[in-house]
Each structure stands twice: as structure tokens, then as C-alpha cells.
Image: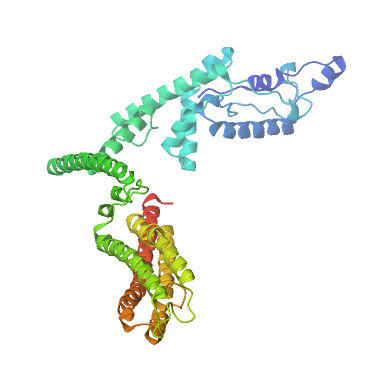
Amino acid sequence: MFRYDNAELANEYSFGVDAQGEQETSDLQRPLSTEDVSDLQQLHNEQELESAYEPSSMQRPPSTIEGLRIPDSTNMHEPPSMQRPRSLTELPAVRRPDSPTRMEDMNEFSDSEDSLLKRVRAADGVSDQQEYHDAQTVSPFPGASAISNTKTVSQLSERDTTAADNGDGMSGATSKVRVQRKSLDQDVANAGAFRPSDGERAQLIERWKNAMAEEERLNVLQHQMESQMRASWSADMSPNFPPKFLCMRPVVSHNIGSVPESRRRYVKISYINWMVTCVTIVANAAVSITIAFSPDKSGHEGAQGGNPIQTTLLSLLYLLGIPLGFITCHFPLYKACCTGLSTRHMVSICGLFIGMLSCLFMAIGPVNTGACGLLLLLDVCDSKSVNLAIPLGIVLGIWTIEVFYFMYCLVAQWRLYRMDVNLQSEARRHIASVVGA
């Protein structure tokens, strides 16, 4: 191992001190004492320990002090090259091995540097991967960074090859190629552990083909359904009610076939009930006008205390219930069953309630209101002919049936409303669970 002598060690620490006048030069040219040499030895030990923990690209040659000759107490005089600095804190920085004049020293100290670094790292328990990472650390000196890194990597590779030849693959420092090879071998081993067999691979391919075929079939079916829905929607949107034989232009689209199968019968019954209501309104007007102008039992025309003009006008006014019954009762129910919207259901329930109140009023039948109800029947039995009570009783029975029918429709529509609301809530929860909202 290369050793510094006493003169070189002194020159290493005194070459950077500038002369600042003859007075300062005379003060600095006094000989080194034993305490000064001890301080220099301690400083060298600290620098050597710090250099052991630096990466290879930043290390400087270990300036050992084994060859330092400590002067005797009787011979303390040294040449001017051993001039003592003014203080230990003002010592100049030790010249790095990356200096162009010290390249030979760097090559010469490489073996001792590696052995020292290996001993220190083995004592501290530093892994090979950390050693490789330190070897790749960029040096703060641009010129020495590339040289040191290249030399360190080559030295690691050479030592790794030597260790492998000796039969101890883990004793040397791990090179970059070795780390990459180990990582690649580990990845291949992990991939081989999960590699499916030929039979499993064939099953996976078959399942994938079946899934693709099913997806294609569903796409074709979806396109067909969308085209059919667009065609049916355009056909359903064309107005077709009222029918043309009524000498009126169609206003709304009414197609019971577009109603879901489970509710189609219910909608048909509602439509038939509206037609029955139309006939009942016409019969009510005819019977009430006839009773208003028929003579009473005493031989006087008109009912006792009756007003035939008022009865006739109100009876004719009730004929407006034909289109109003379709608008308020049947059509909202039809749209609610087609769409299932909660707002449509609420509108239909309100319309059915209005229809029930109207039928109830007609079934009660106050006198002089044009309604063929119970009160008018009692008045006719007292003041009119008994033959007039027969058609009046028939109309009264129809109004009574209408009342009970509207009650049934209210209950059924409320159930449908609750059913559709629950289905929509469940559908929203399902979509939220699938999407993750």
C-alpha cells in the first residue's frame, strides 16, 4: 500500500496557503509541535472515515498516516514546506483524485480503495444493491464523474466474474448486468407460475369467442329493436282520434296496442267505460228534458214547481261531458299505462276523481238540474206518471255503476302508480350500483 511521508503530508495541507506579507510569512514559518501533528493525525482519520462512506466516484485516495514520522522532542525544526496554518479550520481542501495531476494516484489507489470500501460496508451491513446504487451516484466533479463511474462499474463486473469463478457468487459486488439478469429471471419465474396449460388456454379462447359472438348478436338485436321502436313511435305519434267518421280532424294519437300487455285489458275497459258514459250523458239529457215538459198528475204541464227552461239548458250543457270525459278520465289513464311516469299517474288519478264526483252528482239528481238521479226519481213518482220513472231508473242505475267503476279505477291506478314508482327506484339503485355513483 502506498504511504505518504511526512513532507508530502505537510505539502498536502500547506500548498493552498497564500502569503499575505512578510509579517504573516514569518509567523507561519515556525515548526510544528507534537500537538499539531496529533491534530493532523486525527483530521486524517476523520477524512479517511468519511471517504470510506462516499461513492466510488467521489472518493479520494486514502491518505494513510502509517508512514508519518513524528518528530522527536529534541528535533522539532522542519523545512518551510511544513509551515503550520494559522488554524485547523483554515486548512485548504485536500486535492481530489480527479485532478489531471493525480490520475496516476487514482489508478494506483483503486485496489486499496475497493478493499477499504468493501470492509466498511460489510461491517455496516450495506447490501449489494445499495453498493451498486452508490457506484452510479453522479460525482460533483464533471470530469471525474464519467471516469469514476466507468471505472467503478468495470471493477464491479471484474470482481463479480472473479467471485463467480471462485464458486462464491454472492461474495462480490453485484454489477448492473447481474442485477438486470436476476430481475429478468424473477419475472420469468413469476410469469411461469401463472401460465395456463394448453387445455385452459383453449377453454379461455373458446369462451372469448363465444362472448364475442354473443355481443355481436346482442348488437344486431339492439339495432333491430331501435329501428322498430322508431318506426312504431313515428306511427304512434300520428293523430288518429277522434275517428274521421265524426267529421272532425284527428287531434291526438290513441293506440291501445302500444300499451303493455299486462295493462292493455285495463285500458280497454276504461275506453269502453268512456263510450258508455257518452251514451249515458245523451240518455240523461233526453230523459230530463222529457220529464221537464211532461204533464203532472193534476193535468198541468211541467213538474210542480219545476223550471223546464233551466232543466233543458243544463241537460244540453252536460253533453260537453263527452269530450271532457275523454280528456280528463280516459286519455290520462291511457298515457300513464303507456309510459309509467309518476306524473302521468297523478294526473290520471285526479281525472278519475273528478269523473267520480260528476257521476255521483248525476246519481243524486237534484230537481231542476237536468240530472236523472235519485231525487228526481222520487219527485217524478209523486207528481208525474209512473211510466216516466222506468227510463229515469235505468239512467240512475248507470250513474250508480259509473260511481263504483271510478272508485275501482282510483284504487287500481294508485296501485299501478306505486308499482311504477318502486320499479323506477329499483332501476335507479341498480344503475347507481353498476356505475358506482
Task: Please indicate whether residue 288 sits to the left or right of residue 71 in the image.
Answer: left
Q: Nearer the viewer, residue 183 or 190?
A: 190
Residue 103 spot, x, y in % from top left: 53, 15
> Quick one: which residue is furthest to the top in this view?
101
Q: Is residue 49 above or below residue 90?
A: below
Q: Nearer the viewer, residue 33 or 223?
A: 223
Residue 50 spot, x, y in % from top left: 59, 33
Residue 203 spot, x, y in % from top left: 14, 44
Residue found at x 35% / y 48%: 248
Q: Nearer the viewer, residue 198 or 308?
A: 308
Q: Is residue 33 visible?
A: no
Q: Is residue 21 above or below residue 122?
A: above
> Quick one: which residue is furthest to the front in this view?
299
> Quick one: which residue is furthest to the right in this view?
23
Q: Nearer the viewer, residue 101 or 201?
A: 201
Q: Is residue 7 visible?
A: yes
Residue found at x 28% / y 63%: 272
Res 167 → quadrant: top left
**Colouring of the image:** rainbow
Q: Is residue 206 above or below residue 292?
A: above
Residue 340 spot, x, y in % from top left: 36, 57
Res 206 → quadrant: top left
Residue found at x 50% / y 27%: 56
Task: Please indicate whether residue 253 sits to the left or right of residue 78 in the image.
Answer: left
Instruction: Report the number of numbered marks.
Output: 0
